[in-house]
Image (tube, rainbow, N blue to C red):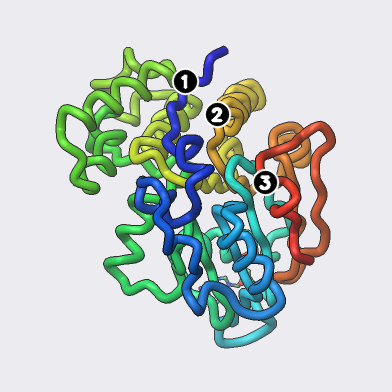
Amino acid sequence: MLCPFTCSLSRNVAAGPSALRANRLPRKDDRRPPADYAVGPTRARCRLAYVARVDTVICLSEVTKRYESGQPALDSISLTVAPGEAVAVMGPSGSGKSTLLNMIAGLDRPTSGTVTVAGQRVDTLGESAVARFRRDQIGMIFQFFNLLDDLTVADNVLLPAQLAGVPRAQARARVDELLAVLRIGPHRDAYPGRLSGGERQRVAIARALVNRPALLLADEPTGALDTATGEQISKLLLDLNSSGQTMILVTHNPDLAARYASRTIRLTDGRIAASGRAAGHRIAGDTAAEVQQ
Ligand code: ADP
């Protein structure tokens, strides 16, 4: 099937992280990474990737997150993710999976270390800048869909585009395109409460994609669905990744990770305990995307 998700990312993959962020062709000074691009041992690799335009959508460098008491939720995590990768994050409850997603999405700040996503240092952004960053660069889907029940399907999907100031006609065209591709067009004027779980997750995926994010974060996307519907949503995510969409998938389901992710990272007590590349998966920038631990 021809990939339906006309993702601007593939156009920008060759253009470097700054261009990726700005949706423009690279300029000469894109080759000069900011002085604080990354810290610690990962710094050399992150900076090299930047200069060589071996793009990384995500570059975490020695990220530690400590809450008031107890051991750190994340303990010196270093990780790079290349454009087009689908990385599964697994681990027992309390191992730091949500904290990791929160760091990447700029929903929380590390106690130390740096978080760079789509060429942008996220951990140093102010409140409104980080909200803009999230709106423009990150799509998120959740186990329980998190749709707005008072808005129709079409308006749920439209909302992030409206908030981003996309011209109305353009935003509506994008919504129609996504609803058609995700086969929820007939439900465009329905309210989420009328839909099945699988349909709701399709709406949530459409909403996550409406602003063509550099990165899709999926937190247990099939966790609330029956097996058959979960399988359909998984296939959809696989199609999306095949089209070049970079994604991080938090899951408790080893089958899902093995079949649909190019790499699996296992967290234990806030550290990367293991990571492995799935056989047969190969993605752009593969060598530069090795896990650092
Ligand atoms: P997971 O998603 O793998 O279940 P989390 O990232 O939610 O794990 O949590 C990792 C650790 O951090 C846990 O010990 C949890 O109790 C702790 N933690 C997470 N969020 C907070 C918070 N806001 N305040 C204090 N401790 C937290």
Q: Kindly report which numbered mark, 3 or 2, lies closer to the viewer in this rendering.
A: 3
- Dot 3 falls on a residue whose secondary structure is loop
How far apart are the alpha carbons under marks 1 and 3?
Answer: 23 Å
Label for residue 16?
none
Contact check, label 1 and label 2, Cβ < 8 Å: yes
**Given the current orientation, which residue lies at the most extreme left position?**
168
Mark 2: amino acid: Ser
**x%, y% of residue 185?**
33, 16
**x%, y% of residue 226?**
61, 27
| Quarter of the C terminus within the rendering | bottom right
Determine the residue positioned at 56% across, 43% down. Answer: 246
Q: Nearer the viewer, residue 111 or 190?
A: 111
How far apart are the alpha carbons under marks 1 and 2?
Answer: 8 Å
Which residue is label 3 attached to?
285
Which residue is label 1 attached to?
4
Tell me if 111 is positioned left or right of 258 in this view: left
Tell me if 124 is positioned left or right of 154 in this view: right
Which residue is label 2 attached to?
243
